Image (cartoon, coloured by chain):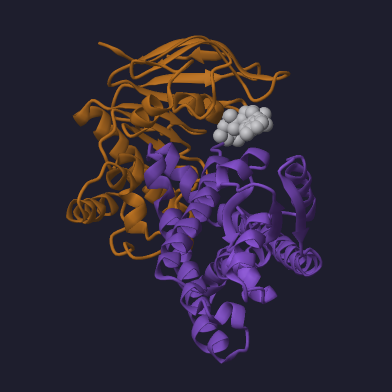
Amino acid sequence: MKFIKTHVSLIFPLVAILLGLEFFIVFDRTTDTYQKSLQNGYSMMVVAKDEMSIDDFQVWDRHIEQVIEVQKNKILERLEMNENPENKKSFEASLPNFYSLKLDGYLTLDELNKVKVNLEKSDNILKIESFQSTYQSKYELFAFIKFSFHTFIVFMSIIGFFLIVKQMEVWNFLHAQRMKVMEIFGASLFLRSKVLMTMAFVDAVIAALTTSIVFYAIQNFWIKNSQMEIVKEKINSVFMMTDILILLFASIILVMIAVYIVIINVKEE
Amino acid sequence: MSDVITANNLTLSYDKEEQIIKNATFSIKKGDFVFITGASGSGKSTLLKSFYGSLPVNQGSLIVGGLDMVDIKKDKLQELRTHLGIVFQDYRLINEWTVERNVVLPLWIAGYSDEVQSTQAERLLHHVKLSGKEKKYPLELSGGEQQRVGVARALAKNPFLILADEPTGNLDDYSSNVIWDLMENACHQLDTTVVVVTHRIPAVFNIRYRHFTIDENGSVYEIH
Ligand SMILES: Nc1ncnc2c1ncn2[C@@H]1O[C@H](COP(=O)(O)OP(=O)(O)OP(=O)(O)O)[C@@H](O)[C@H]1O
Ligand SMILES: [Mg+2]
Protein backbone atom coordinates (compact mmCIF):
# COMPACT_ATOMS: atom_id res chain seq x y z
CA MET A 1 0.00 0.00 0.00
CA LYS A 2 2.76 2.39 1.01
CA PHE A 3 4.61 1.34 -2.12
CA ILE A 4 1.64 2.13 -4.35
CA LYS A 5 1.09 5.45 -2.62
CA THR A 6 4.66 6.67 -3.05
CA HIS A 7 4.67 5.64 -6.69
CA VAL A 8 1.27 7.01 -7.63
CA SER A 9 2.12 10.36 -6.15
CA LEU A 10 4.97 10.66 -8.63
CA ILE A 11 3.32 8.95 -11.58
CA PHE A 12 0.17 11.05 -11.37
CA PRO A 13 1.76 14.50 -11.85
CA LEU A 14 4.14 13.05 -14.40
CA VAL A 15 1.24 11.75 -16.47
CA ALA A 16 -0.41 15.17 -16.19
CA ILE A 17 2.66 16.86 -17.61
CA LEU A 18 3.14 14.25 -20.32
CA LEU A 19 -0.51 14.45 -21.36
CA GLY A 20 -0.04 18.19 -21.70
CA LEU A 21 3.06 17.73 -23.79
CA GLU A 22 1.42 15.15 -26.03
CA PHE A 23 -1.72 17.26 -26.48
CA PHE A 24 0.54 20.10 -27.46
CA ILE A 25 2.29 18.04 -30.10
CA VAL A 26 -0.89 16.39 -31.39
CA PHE A 27 -2.82 19.63 -31.57
CA ASP A 28 -0.19 21.32 -33.66
CA ARG A 29 0.22 18.29 -35.85
CA THR A 30 -3.43 17.62 -36.59
CA THR A 31 -4.44 21.22 -37.09
CA ASP A 32 -1.49 21.80 -39.37
CA THR A 33 -3.58 21.02 -42.47
CA TYR A 34 -6.37 23.19 -41.23
CA GLN A 35 -3.93 26.02 -40.75
CA LYS A 36 -2.58 25.44 -44.26
CA SER A 37 -6.04 25.40 -45.71
CA LEU A 38 -6.78 28.72 -44.09
CA GLN A 39 -3.61 30.02 -45.55
CA ASN A 40 -4.32 28.68 -49.01
CA GLY A 41 -7.93 29.78 -48.87
CA TYR A 42 -6.59 33.24 -48.71
CA SER A 43 -5.41 34.65 -51.99
CA MET A 44 -4.84 38.04 -53.48
CA MET A 45 -5.86 38.95 -56.96
CA VAL A 46 -3.57 41.40 -58.64
CA VAL A 47 -4.10 43.22 -61.90
CA ALA A 48 -0.92 44.38 -63.59
CA LYS A 49 -0.20 46.38 -66.75
CA ASP A 50 2.79 44.33 -67.90
CA GLU A 51 3.62 40.71 -67.28
CA MET A 52 5.23 39.99 -63.92
CA SER A 53 7.26 37.00 -62.75
CA ILE A 54 7.49 35.76 -59.18
CA ASP A 55 10.77 37.61 -58.80
CA ASP A 56 9.10 40.85 -59.81
CA PHE A 57 6.54 40.35 -57.07
CA GLN A 58 9.09 39.39 -54.50
CA VAL A 59 10.91 42.64 -55.05
CA TRP A 60 7.89 44.33 -53.49
CA ASP A 61 7.11 41.84 -50.77
CA ARG A 62 8.96 38.78 -49.55
CA HIS A 63 5.87 36.97 -48.24
CA ILE A 64 4.77 36.09 -51.75
CA GLU A 65 5.48 32.45 -52.34
CA GLN A 66 3.61 31.49 -55.45
CA VAL A 67 2.20 33.34 -58.43
CA ILE A 68 -0.49 31.82 -60.59
CA GLU A 69 -1.26 33.61 -63.78
CA VAL A 70 -4.90 33.64 -64.73
CA GLN A 71 -5.10 32.77 -68.44
CA LYS A 72 -6.52 35.62 -70.45
CA ASN A 73 -8.51 33.41 -72.79
CA LYS A 74 -10.20 31.91 -69.75
CA ILE A 75 -11.36 35.38 -68.81
CA LEU A 76 -12.52 35.98 -72.33
CA GLU A 77 -14.37 32.69 -72.36
CA ARG A 78 -16.17 33.81 -69.29
CA LEU A 79 -17.03 37.05 -71.01
CA GLU A 80 -18.21 35.08 -74.06
CA MET A 81 -16.31 37.27 -76.43
CA ASN A 82 -15.12 34.52 -78.68
CA GLU A 83 -17.35 35.01 -81.74
CA ASN A 84 -14.88 37.02 -83.73
CA PRO A 85 -11.27 35.74 -83.57
CA GLU A 86 -9.94 39.10 -84.86
CA ASN A 87 -11.78 41.02 -82.23
CA LYS A 88 -10.68 38.60 -79.61
CA LYS A 89 -6.99 38.94 -80.46
CA SER A 90 -6.97 42.72 -80.22
CA PHE A 91 -9.07 42.67 -77.10
CA GLU A 92 -6.78 40.12 -75.51
CA ALA A 93 -3.76 42.31 -76.25
CA SER A 94 -5.38 45.27 -74.59
CA LEU A 95 -6.25 43.33 -71.48
CA PRO A 96 -3.97 43.72 -68.43
CA ASN A 97 -2.48 40.66 -66.69
CA PHE A 98 -4.26 38.88 -63.84
CA TYR A 99 -2.42 37.07 -61.10
CA SER A 100 -3.46 35.07 -58.09
CA LEU A 101 -0.87 35.23 -55.30
CA LYS A 102 -0.19 32.68 -52.57
CA LEU A 103 1.67 33.70 -49.44
CA ASP A 104 4.40 31.88 -47.59
CA GLY A 105 2.84 31.59 -44.16
CA TYR A 106 0.01 32.13 -41.81
CA LEU A 107 -0.03 35.92 -41.72
CA THR A 108 -1.90 38.15 -39.34
CA LEU A 109 -4.22 40.77 -40.71
CA ASP A 110 -1.71 43.53 -40.13
CA GLU A 111 0.90 41.61 -42.00
CA LEU A 112 -1.54 41.06 -44.87
CA ASN A 113 -2.28 44.74 -45.09
CA LYS A 114 1.40 45.44 -45.17
CA VAL A 115 1.76 43.10 -48.13
CA LYS A 116 -1.00 44.99 -49.86
CA VAL A 117 0.57 48.37 -49.16
CA ASN A 118 3.91 47.11 -50.42
CA LEU A 119 2.43 45.87 -53.67
CA GLU A 120 0.59 49.12 -54.23
CA LYS A 121 3.94 50.88 -54.37
CA SER A 122 4.53 49.28 -57.75
CA ASP A 123 3.51 51.44 -60.71
CA ASN A 124 2.87 48.34 -62.71
CA ILE A 125 0.17 47.04 -60.38
CA LEU A 126 -3.21 48.50 -61.13
CA LYS A 127 -5.42 46.84 -58.59
CA ILE A 128 -5.24 44.48 -55.62
CA GLU A 129 -8.24 42.57 -54.44
CA SER A 130 -8.32 40.38 -51.30
CA PHE A 131 -10.96 38.47 -49.39
CA GLN A 132 -10.36 39.32 -45.81
CA SER A 133 -13.52 38.96 -43.79
CA THR A 134 -13.96 35.19 -43.65
CA TYR A 135 -10.23 34.78 -43.38
CA GLN A 136 -10.11 37.11 -40.44
CA SER A 137 -12.85 35.50 -38.37
CA LYS A 138 -11.56 32.01 -38.98
CA TYR A 139 -8.05 33.03 -38.20
CA GLU A 140 -8.98 34.73 -34.98
CA LEU A 141 -11.06 31.83 -33.77
CA PHE A 142 -8.25 29.46 -34.53
CA ALA A 143 -5.70 31.66 -32.80
CA PHE A 144 -7.95 31.95 -29.77
CA ILE A 145 -8.46 28.20 -29.46
CA LYS A 146 -4.76 27.60 -29.85
CA PHE A 147 -3.89 30.21 -27.23
CA SER A 148 -6.40 28.90 -24.65
CA PHE A 149 -5.23 25.40 -25.24
CA HIS A 150 -1.59 26.28 -24.76
CA THR A 151 -2.33 28.33 -21.65
CA PHE A 152 -4.25 25.44 -20.16
CA ILE A 153 -1.37 23.06 -20.84
CA VAL A 154 1.18 25.42 -19.29
CA PHE A 155 -0.90 25.69 -16.12
CA MET A 156 -1.40 21.97 -15.93
CA SER A 157 2.35 21.49 -16.24
CA ILE A 158 3.08 23.99 -13.49
CA ILE A 159 0.68 22.20 -11.14
CA GLY A 160 2.22 18.89 -12.13
CA PHE A 161 5.64 20.25 -11.41
CA PHE A 162 4.62 21.41 -7.94
CA LEU A 163 3.25 17.97 -7.18
CA ILE A 164 6.56 16.48 -8.22
CA VAL A 165 8.41 18.87 -5.92
CA LYS A 166 6.11 17.77 -3.08
CA GLN A 167 6.88 14.16 -3.84
CA MET A 168 10.58 14.97 -3.83
CA GLU A 169 10.25 16.21 -0.26
CA VAL A 170 8.74 12.87 0.67
CA TRP A 171 11.60 11.08 -1.05
CA ASN A 172 14.08 13.24 0.73
CA PHE A 173 12.51 12.24 4.03
CA LEU A 174 12.49 8.54 3.13
CA HIS A 175 15.95 8.29 1.64
CA ALA A 176 18.07 10.93 3.36
CA GLN A 177 19.08 8.73 6.32
CA ARG A 178 20.36 5.94 4.09
CA MET A 179 22.16 8.30 1.73
CA LYS A 180 23.90 10.09 4.61
CA VAL A 181 25.15 6.85 6.13
CA MET A 182 26.41 5.68 2.76
CA GLU A 183 28.18 8.97 2.20
CA ILE A 184 30.05 8.73 5.48
CA PHE A 185 31.22 5.26 4.47
CA GLY A 186 32.53 6.67 1.21
CA ALA A 187 29.86 5.54 -1.26
CA SER A 188 29.95 7.32 -4.61
CA LEU A 189 27.12 9.59 -5.71
CA PHE A 190 26.01 6.86 -8.09
CA LEU A 191 25.76 4.20 -5.37
CA ARG A 192 24.01 6.55 -3.01
CA SER A 193 21.36 7.48 -5.52
CA LYS A 194 20.93 4.09 -7.19
CA VAL A 195 17.75 3.16 -5.34
CA LEU A 196 16.19 6.53 -5.98
CA MET A 197 17.25 6.51 -9.63
CA THR A 198 15.85 3.05 -10.23
CA MET A 199 12.59 3.95 -8.58
CA ALA A 200 12.29 7.21 -10.47
CA PHE A 201 13.22 5.51 -13.73
CA VAL A 202 10.53 2.86 -13.31
CA ASP A 203 7.96 5.54 -12.49
CA ALA A 204 9.01 7.58 -15.51
CA VAL A 205 8.54 4.60 -17.80
CA ILE A 206 5.15 3.78 -16.28
CA ALA A 207 4.02 7.39 -16.70
CA ALA A 208 5.15 7.52 -20.33
CA LEU A 209 3.38 4.27 -21.16
CA THR A 210 0.21 5.36 -19.40
CA THR A 211 0.14 8.54 -21.43
CA SER A 212 0.77 6.58 -24.62
CA ILE A 213 -2.14 4.24 -23.85
CA VAL A 214 -4.43 7.20 -23.19
CA PHE A 215 -3.57 8.69 -26.56
CA TYR A 216 -3.86 5.40 -28.33
CA ALA A 217 -7.34 5.10 -26.89
CA ILE A 218 -8.24 8.65 -27.89
CA GLN A 219 -7.11 7.93 -31.42
CA ASN A 220 -8.75 4.57 -31.86
CA PHE A 221 -11.95 4.81 -29.91
CA TRP A 222 -12.91 8.39 -29.48
CA ILE A 223 -11.83 10.22 -32.63
CA LYS A 224 -12.72 7.35 -34.94
CA ASN A 225 -16.32 7.56 -33.78
CA SER A 226 -16.44 11.33 -33.72
CA GLN A 227 -17.47 13.97 -36.24
CA MET A 228 -14.29 16.02 -36.00
CA GLU A 229 -13.39 16.05 -39.65
CA ILE A 230 -10.34 18.27 -39.28
CA VAL A 231 -8.74 15.74 -36.95
CA LYS A 232 -10.26 12.64 -38.50
CA GLU A 233 -8.65 13.14 -41.86
CA LYS A 234 -5.31 13.04 -40.06
CA ILE A 235 -6.21 10.24 -37.69
CA ASN A 236 -2.91 8.48 -38.14
CA SER A 237 -0.97 11.46 -36.94
CA VAL A 238 -2.93 11.79 -33.70
CA PHE A 239 -0.65 9.34 -32.00
CA MET A 240 2.54 8.10 -33.61
CA MET A 241 4.85 5.41 -32.34
CA THR A 242 7.70 7.91 -32.20
CA ASP A 243 5.68 9.83 -29.62
CA ILE A 244 6.35 7.03 -27.15
CA LEU A 245 10.03 7.84 -27.45
CA ILE A 246 9.45 11.56 -27.03
CA LEU A 247 7.32 10.90 -23.94
CA LEU A 248 9.83 8.47 -22.47
CA PHE A 249 12.63 10.91 -23.03
CA ALA A 250 10.76 13.84 -21.50
CA SER A 251 9.59 11.75 -18.57
CA ILE A 252 13.04 10.39 -17.76
CA ILE A 253 14.68 13.81 -18.03
CA LEU A 254 12.06 15.25 -15.67
CA VAL A 255 12.47 12.63 -12.95
CA MET A 256 16.24 12.64 -13.24
CA ILE A 257 16.23 16.38 -12.59
CA ALA A 258 13.96 15.74 -9.60
CA VAL A 259 16.26 12.99 -8.28
CA TYR A 260 19.30 15.16 -8.75
CA ILE A 261 17.70 17.96 -6.74
CA VAL A 262 16.92 15.51 -3.93
CA ILE A 263 20.45 14.13 -3.90
CA ILE A 264 22.27 17.43 -3.80
CA ASN A 265 19.99 18.57 -0.98
CA VAL A 266 20.98 15.68 1.29
CA LYS A 267 23.66 17.11 3.56
CA GLU A 268 25.50 15.00 6.09
CA GLU A 269 25.76 16.46 9.57
CA MET B 1 56.43 4.93 12.67
CA SER B 2 54.27 7.10 10.45
CA ASP B 3 51.54 9.41 11.71
CA VAL B 4 47.96 8.45 11.02
CA ILE B 5 46.49 11.63 12.48
CA THR B 6 48.40 14.87 13.00
CA ALA B 7 46.72 17.95 14.44
CA ASN B 8 48.43 21.29 14.76
CA ASN B 9 46.62 24.08 16.62
CA LEU B 10 43.42 22.47 15.44
CA THR B 11 40.35 24.57 16.16
CA LEU B 12 36.81 23.35 15.47
CA SER B 13 33.48 25.12 15.62
CA TYR B 14 29.94 24.87 14.31
CA ASP B 15 29.44 28.61 14.19
CA LYS B 16 31.61 31.70 14.43
CA GLU B 17 30.95 32.54 18.09
CA GLU B 18 31.74 29.30 19.89
CA GLN B 19 34.90 27.26 19.46
CA ILE B 20 34.38 23.67 20.60
CA ILE B 21 37.97 22.44 20.24
CA LYS B 22 40.74 25.00 20.73
CA ASN B 23 44.33 24.80 19.53
CA ALA B 24 44.68 21.06 19.81
CA THR B 25 48.11 19.71 18.90
CA PHE B 26 48.80 15.98 18.93
CA SER B 27 49.81 13.13 16.74
CA ILE B 28 48.52 9.57 16.62
CA LYS B 29 50.78 6.94 15.11
CA LYS B 30 50.08 3.75 13.27
CA GLY B 31 49.02 1.00 15.69
CA ASP B 32 48.22 3.43 18.52
CA PHE B 33 45.22 2.76 20.71
CA VAL B 34 43.80 6.07 21.98
CA PHE B 35 41.00 6.67 24.46
CA ILE B 36 39.39 10.10 24.45
CA THR B 37 37.44 11.11 27.56
CA GLY B 38 35.81 14.32 28.67
CA ALA B 39 32.59 15.67 30.08
CA SER B 40 29.39 15.47 28.11
CA GLY B 41 29.34 18.30 25.60
CA SER B 42 33.09 18.84 25.79
CA GLY B 43 33.57 18.09 22.10
CA LYS B 44 34.59 14.43 21.85
CA SER B 45 32.18 13.62 19.00
CA THR B 46 33.10 16.91 17.36
CA LEU B 47 36.77 15.96 17.31
CA LEU B 48 35.97 12.56 15.75
CA LYS B 49 33.80 14.20 13.10
CA SER B 50 36.73 16.29 11.98
CA PHE B 51 38.79 13.08 11.55
CA TYR B 52 36.35 11.67 9.02
CA GLY B 53 35.79 15.00 7.31
CA SER B 54 32.23 15.61 8.44
CA LEU B 55 33.19 18.89 10.06
CA PRO B 56 35.54 21.32 8.32
CA VAL B 57 38.68 22.52 10.05
CA ASN B 58 38.16 26.01 11.36
CA GLN B 59 41.78 26.92 12.09
CA GLY B 60 45.09 25.11 12.26
CA SER B 61 45.90 21.96 10.39
CA LEU B 62 44.75 18.36 10.41
CA ILE B 63 46.23 15.50 8.45
CA VAL B 64 44.50 12.10 8.37
CA GLY B 65 46.02 9.15 6.55
CA GLY B 66 48.39 11.50 4.76
CA LEU B 67 45.57 13.74 3.50
CA ASP B 68 45.32 17.39 4.40
CA MET B 69 41.78 17.75 5.72
CA VAL B 70 41.79 21.54 5.37
CA ASP B 71 41.21 21.61 1.65
CA ILE B 72 40.50 17.98 0.86
CA LYS B 73 38.80 17.24 -2.46
CA LYS B 74 35.50 15.39 -2.51
CA ASP B 75 36.84 12.33 -4.29
CA LYS B 76 39.85 12.08 -1.94
CA LEU B 77 37.58 12.27 1.09
CA GLN B 78 35.32 9.61 -0.41
CA GLU B 79 38.35 7.37 -0.96
CA LEU B 80 39.64 8.00 2.58
CA ARG B 81 36.29 7.12 4.09
CA THR B 82 36.24 3.69 2.44
CA HIS B 83 39.34 2.89 4.53
CA LEU B 84 37.92 4.06 7.86
CA GLY B 85 35.84 2.12 10.37
CA ILE B 86 33.41 4.52 12.02
CA VAL B 87 31.15 3.70 14.96
CA PHE B 88 28.54 6.34 15.72
CA GLN B 89 27.23 7.27 19.11
CA ASP B 90 23.70 7.04 17.65
CA TYR B 91 24.47 3.85 15.64
CA ARG B 92 23.21 5.15 12.26
CA LEU B 93 22.12 1.86 10.80
CA ILE B 94 20.04 1.80 7.62
CA ASN B 95 16.61 0.92 8.92
CA GLU B 96 15.18 -0.46 5.69
CA TRP B 97 18.11 -2.88 5.29
CA THR B 98 18.55 -6.17 7.12
CA VAL B 99 21.23 -6.50 9.80
CA GLU B 100 23.23 -8.61 7.38
CA ARG B 101 23.28 -5.92 4.71
CA ASN B 102 24.05 -3.23 7.26
CA VAL B 103 27.08 -5.07 8.53
CA VAL B 104 28.68 -5.43 5.12
CA LEU B 105 27.88 -1.92 3.87
CA PRO B 106 31.62 -1.12 3.48
CA LEU B 107 32.10 -4.30 1.44
CA TRP B 108 29.06 -3.50 -0.72
CA ILE B 109 30.46 -0.02 -1.37
CA ALA B 110 33.81 -1.55 -2.32
CA GLY B 111 31.99 -3.81 -4.78
CA TYR B 112 32.61 -7.23 -3.22
CA SER B 113 30.54 -10.12 -4.54
CA ASP B 114 27.36 -11.25 -2.81
CA GLU B 115 29.03 -14.47 -1.65
CA VAL B 116 31.91 -12.63 -0.01
CA GLN B 117 29.44 -10.24 1.58
CA SER B 118 27.29 -12.97 3.07
CA THR B 119 30.19 -15.06 4.43
CA GLN B 120 31.71 -11.93 5.95
CA ALA B 121 28.35 -10.93 7.44
CA GLU B 122 28.10 -14.30 9.12
CA ARG B 123 31.64 -14.06 10.49
CA LEU B 124 31.23 -10.49 11.75
CA LEU B 125 27.87 -11.13 13.40
CA HIS B 126 29.35 -14.17 15.07
CA HIS B 127 32.12 -11.96 16.50
CA VAL B 128 29.64 -9.52 18.04
CA LYS B 129 27.47 -12.38 19.33
CA LEU B 130 24.57 -11.70 17.01
CA SER B 131 24.48 -14.94 15.02
CA GLY B 132 20.94 -15.75 13.99
CA LYS B 133 19.87 -12.12 13.68
CA GLU B 134 21.05 -11.77 10.06
CA LYS B 135 17.58 -11.30 8.57
CA LYS B 136 16.25 -8.95 11.23
CA TYR B 137 15.86 -5.23 10.70
CA PRO B 138 17.62 -2.71 12.97
CA LEU B 139 14.40 -1.51 14.56
CA GLU B 140 13.66 -5.07 15.63
CA LEU B 141 16.85 -5.10 17.75
CA SER B 142 17.56 -3.69 21.20
CA GLY B 143 19.72 -0.60 21.49
CA GLY B 144 22.73 -2.63 22.60
CA GLU B 145 22.26 -5.06 19.71
CA GLN B 146 22.09 -2.19 17.22
CA GLN B 147 25.27 -0.81 18.70
CA ARG B 148 27.04 -4.12 18.15
CA VAL B 149 25.87 -4.16 14.54
CA GLY B 150 27.45 -0.72 14.22
CA VAL B 151 30.75 -2.03 15.63
CA ALA B 152 30.68 -5.05 13.32
CA ARG B 153 30.10 -2.74 10.34
CA ALA B 154 33.11 -0.64 11.30
CA LEU B 155 35.34 -3.73 11.37
CA ALA B 156 33.99 -5.21 8.12
CA LYS B 157 36.68 -4.07 5.72
CA ASN B 158 39.72 -4.17 8.04
CA PRO B 159 40.09 -0.37 8.13
CA PHE B 160 43.49 1.20 8.84
CA LEU B 161 41.81 3.54 11.32
CA ILE B 162 38.85 2.86 13.61
CA LEU B 163 37.00 5.90 14.96
CA ALA B 164 34.51 4.78 17.58
CA ASP B 165 32.16 7.09 19.47
CA GLU B 166 30.97 5.45 22.70
CA PRO B 167 30.95 1.94 21.21
CA THR B 168 29.96 0.41 24.55
CA GLY B 169 27.65 3.19 25.69
CA ASN B 170 24.61 0.94 25.81
CA LEU B 171 26.20 -2.36 26.69
CA ASP B 172 26.51 -4.42 29.84
CA ASP B 173 29.94 -5.53 31.07
CA TYR B 174 29.84 -8.79 29.16
CA SER B 175 29.02 -7.21 25.79
CA SER B 176 31.39 -4.34 26.46
CA ASN B 177 34.23 -6.78 26.94
CA VAL B 178 33.33 -8.47 23.66
CA ILE B 179 33.73 -5.11 21.91
CA TRP B 180 36.97 -4.26 23.71
CA ASP B 181 38.42 -7.63 22.79
CA LEU B 182 37.58 -7.06 19.13
CA MET B 183 39.24 -3.66 19.15
CA GLU B 184 42.29 -4.90 20.99
CA ASN B 185 42.67 -7.71 18.49
CA ALA B 186 42.35 -5.38 15.50
CA CYS B 187 45.02 -3.13 17.01
CA HIS B 188 47.29 -5.91 18.14
CA GLN B 189 47.04 -8.30 15.19
CA LEU B 190 46.39 -6.01 12.24
CA ASP B 191 48.24 -2.94 13.53
CA THR B 192 45.03 -0.94 13.11
CA THR B 193 45.00 2.50 14.68
CA VAL B 194 42.06 2.84 17.07
CA VAL B 195 40.57 6.03 18.48
CA VAL B 196 37.76 5.45 20.96
CA VAL B 197 35.61 8.03 22.70
CA THR B 198 34.31 6.70 26.00
CA HIS B 199 33.05 7.78 29.39
CA ARG B 200 34.59 4.80 31.08
CA ILE B 201 37.97 3.29 30.28
CA PRO B 202 37.76 -0.47 30.95
CA ALA B 203 39.41 -1.55 34.19
CA VAL B 204 41.24 -4.39 32.52
CA PHE B 205 42.89 -3.60 29.24
CA ASN B 206 45.46 -5.93 27.76
CA ILE B 207 47.41 -3.63 25.46
CA ARG B 208 49.25 -0.40 25.93
CA TYR B 209 46.99 2.61 25.27
CA ARG B 210 47.13 6.40 25.27
CA HIS B 211 44.59 8.57 27.01
CA PHE B 212 43.51 12.01 25.77
CA THR B 213 41.03 14.18 27.55
CA ILE B 214 39.15 17.32 26.56
CA ASP B 215 38.59 19.89 29.29
CA GLU B 216 35.69 22.31 29.62
CA ASN B 217 37.56 24.94 27.57
CA GLY B 218 37.97 22.66 24.61
CA SER B 219 41.68 22.03 25.16
CA VAL B 220 42.96 18.55 24.40
CA TYR B 221 45.51 17.04 26.83
CA GLU B 222 47.28 13.74 26.82
CA ILE B 223 47.15 12.17 30.28
CA HIS B 224 49.50 9.33 29.46
N1 LIG C 1 25.50 19.87 14.73
C1 LIG C 1 25.80 20.75 15.69
N2 LIG C 1 25.55 22.06 15.51
C2 LIG C 1 25.86 22.98 16.44
N3 LIG C 1 26.41 22.67 17.61
C3 LIG C 1 26.70 21.38 17.87
C4 LIG C 1 26.40 20.35 16.92
N4 LIG C 1 26.78 19.17 17.44
C5 LIG C 1 27.30 19.46 18.66
N5 LIG C 1 27.25 20.76 18.92
C6 LIG C 1 27.74 21.42 20.15
O1 LIG C 1 29.11 21.14 20.31
C7 LIG C 1 29.42 20.86 21.65
C8 LIG C 1 30.17 19.54 21.74
O2 LIG C 1 29.33 18.50 21.27
P1 LIG C 1 29.82 17.01 21.12
O3 LIG C 1 28.73 16.24 20.50
O4 LIG C 1 31.13 16.99 20.46
O5 LIG C 1 29.97 16.61 22.65
P2 LIG C 1 30.46 15.23 23.25
O6 LIG C 1 31.73 15.50 23.97
O7 LIG C 1 30.48 14.19 22.21
O8 LIG C 1 29.32 14.95 24.31
P3 LIG C 1 28.63 13.54 24.71
O9 LIG C 1 29.56 12.89 25.68
O10 LIG C 1 27.38 13.96 25.38
O11 LIG C 1 28.41 12.78 23.47
C9 LIG C 1 28.13 20.85 22.41
O12 LIG C 1 28.07 22.04 23.15
C10 LIG C 1 27.05 20.85 21.36
O13 LIG C 1 26.00 21.69 21.78
MG1 LIG D 1 29.36 12.62 21.72
Across and down, in percent, residue B18 comes to 70, 20
Q: Residue at x 42, y 44 (%)?
A: A182
Q: Looking at the picture, does residue A59 appear above or below residue A242? A: above
Q: Quadrant of residue A140?
A: bottom right
**Chain identifier of the purple chain:** A
Based on the displayed image, in which of its 4 quarters is residue A154 positioned?
Answer: bottom right
The color chain B is rendered in: orange
B107 or A122, which lies in front?
A122
Answer with left or right where residue B95 lies relative to residue B156: right
Where residue B92 sits in the image (x, y, percent)?
A: 48, 47
In the image, residue B93 above or below residue A185: below
Res A248 seen here:
yes
In which quadrant will I find the C terminus of chain A?
Answer: top right
Residue appearing at x 22%, y 56% in the figure: B118
Residue at (55, 66) in percent of width and height? A29
Position of residue A142 relative to residue A171, above or below, is below
Residue A163, percent from left and from top: 66, 61
Residue A137 vs residue A62, the one in the foreground: A62
Residue A175 visible (yes or no): no
Q: How many marks?
A: 0
